[in-house]
Each structure stands twice: as structure tokens, then as C-alpha cells.
Amino acid sequence: MQSNNLSEVTEFILLGFSNFHEHKITLFVIFLFLYILTLAGNAIIVTIIYIDHHLHTPMYFFLSILASSETVYTLVIIPRMLSSLVAQNQPISLAGCTTQMFFFVTLAINNCFLLTVMGYDRYVAICNPLRYTVIMSKKVCVQLMCGAFGIGLAMAAVQVSSIFTLPFCHRVVGHFFCDILPVMKLSCIDTTINEIINFVISSFVILVPMGLVFISYVLIISTILKIASAEGRKKAFATCASHLTVVIVHYGCASIAYLKPKSENSIEQDLLLSVTYTIITPLLNPVVYSLRNKEVKDALRKVVGRKIS
């Protein structure tokens, strides 16, 4: 009977925001506006860093990689979510659902470790400035980037394969994309082992980067406090403020979403939380780094001034 059920479930129905049917046009306009801002913001950051040679440093190299990763991350989820607001309850094939979950998990984990790498970059810049160019060489930067992406691929392969080897008896996903827990709930069998696997991996990819970033900032702050000049301390803090803001929001949302006890929230509350880490967080990066970072703002003014001329 299980094999029959498994063969019958060849596609899923994403409920999305069907409970908000009367507000779907409003939601579509809001989400589309935020999505355009996210794409534009990340594209501007990548372009500015590419054009301005003063920004060809490890810090901005990792920022451009993060912006590119966030762009693909949103492309995996948001366009389909927008189309589901126009045409309710759209089906997604089993293969499509698997692909969406794989890319989502890979990029989400990649972003967690990229933020950790950026924290390490700030630690070296402030705590060991004389050896910064030696430690953060081009080769090391590429290795760190590949390491973050490799961890994302490996963890995603384990998580996604553990989900899609389950037999499914239900087709309706109470979510706007193929997230891990909503899809897992559709299984015919007990998913305790899968839940343990998911919790262990989620704990590793959230708590380990958080711990490393925390250690980096303890060392950074202790070094900054030893700087004699108040202006020097202010400048050192300023180089870390943007990264720290993004880290707090990013890891905070991820922890609430994946490390909380088995959800007793309503579907509406879970959807609101998912919107935060799939739409708001990717938008936060370009906003924070453009508004709080003097070098990015100066580079943007140069490019805009050049275009006007």
C-alpha cells in the first residue's frame, strides 16, 4: 500500500497564502516591490564592487559573493510564490519540489558560513592588521568561499535525500515553498529519525557559525578597547557595524525557524516567519551595507557622478 501511495504522489499542491485570499493582490504588490528592491540592491552592490578598484579587498569580495548568493536564494523561492498569489494552489512536481528544497537549503547554509567567513575577515583586519594581506590572500579567500559552498552542498544532500526517500501519502503542502518541515509532515510513516537528522544539521549550521562569529567579536572588541584614540575606536567599530547587524538578524531568524520546539504556531505565524527569512533578510544585506558603509556610499556616488557626467 505504501509503494502505491508513493507512486501516486508525483506532485504537491502549495497552499501558499490561500488563507489570505482577500488580501492576495495587496500581498502580491508588497512582495513584488520588496523583491525588486532586493534584486536591485544586490545587483548594485555586486556592480559597485566590480567597478571600483578600491573595493577589491577580501571584505568586499565576500560581500559580493553573499549578495550573489542571496539573489539566487530569492530566485529559487519568490517568483513561484508571486505566481501562486495570482493563481492559487499551483501544483509543483516531485522533482521540482526536490530541486527547490535542495537549492534553498544549499544557499541558506552557504550564507550562514559566508557570514562566518566575513567575521573572520574582520577579526584578521582588526586584530592582526600587519599580516592581513598575507593571511587573507586571494587563494585563501577562494578556499574559504568554496568551503562555505561545499558545506552547504553536503548538508543539503543529506537533508534533502532523507526527506525524499520517505513515502508520501498527502499532496497538500501548507506553505508557499517546499520547506523541510512542511514536506516532512506529508509522509505516511513516523518521521522521528528524519526530525533528528534535520535538528542535528540545523543546529550544526546555525550554532557553529554563531559560535565562531561570537568568538571573533569577543576578540575584536577586546582589541578595539585597547586602541588609545577615540577616533580609532570609532572607525574600528564602524567597519564591523554592518556585518554585525546582518549577523544578528540572519542567525536570529534562522534559530527561531529551525531550532524552536515542534511548532505549535498557526499556519499564519509560520508563514510570517518564513517571509522574514526568505524576503526581509535578503533585502536587509544591501540596505545595511549601503546605508552604513561609507566606502560603498562613496563608490556609489562616484559611479553615479560618472554616469551623470
Image (cartoon, grey):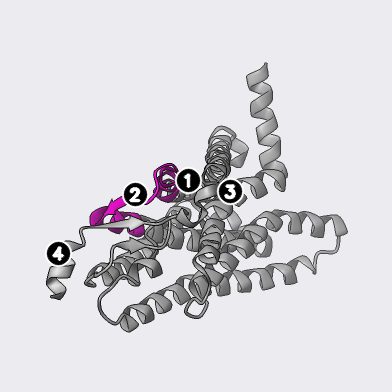
> Could one spot residue 174 in this view of the protein?
yes
Q: Amino acid at mark 1?
A: Thr
Q: As rendered, which of 5 and 119 lies closer to the eye?
A: 5
Distance from disc 4 to disc 2, alpha carbons, whole Å, reads: 20 Å
Distance from disc 4 to disc 1, alpha carbons, whole Å, reads: 35 Å
Q: Circle 1 is placed at which residue position?
A: 71
Mark seen at residue 119 = none
Q: Residues within 10 Å of mark 1 (few under 14, many from 20)?
A: many
Magenta segment: does it hold 86? Answer: yes
Q: Circle 2 is placed at which residue position?
A: 90
Question: Which residues fall within the magenta stretch?
Answer: 75-102
Q: Residues within 10 Å of mark 3 (few under 14, many from 20)?
A: many
Residue at image point 38% right, 75% down:
198
Q: Circle 3 is placed at which residue position?
A: 283
Q: Circle 4 is placed at which residue position?
A: 7
Residue at image point 57% right, 47% down:
60
Q: Nearer the viewer, mark 4 or mark 1?
A: 4
Q: Earlier in the sequence, mark 4 or mark 2?
A: 4
Q: Earlier in the sequence, mark 3 or mark 4?
A: 4
Q: Is residue 199 above or below residue 126?
A: below
Q: Quadrant of residue 243?
A: bottom right
Distance from disc 1 to disc 3, alpha carbons, whole Å, reads: 9 Å
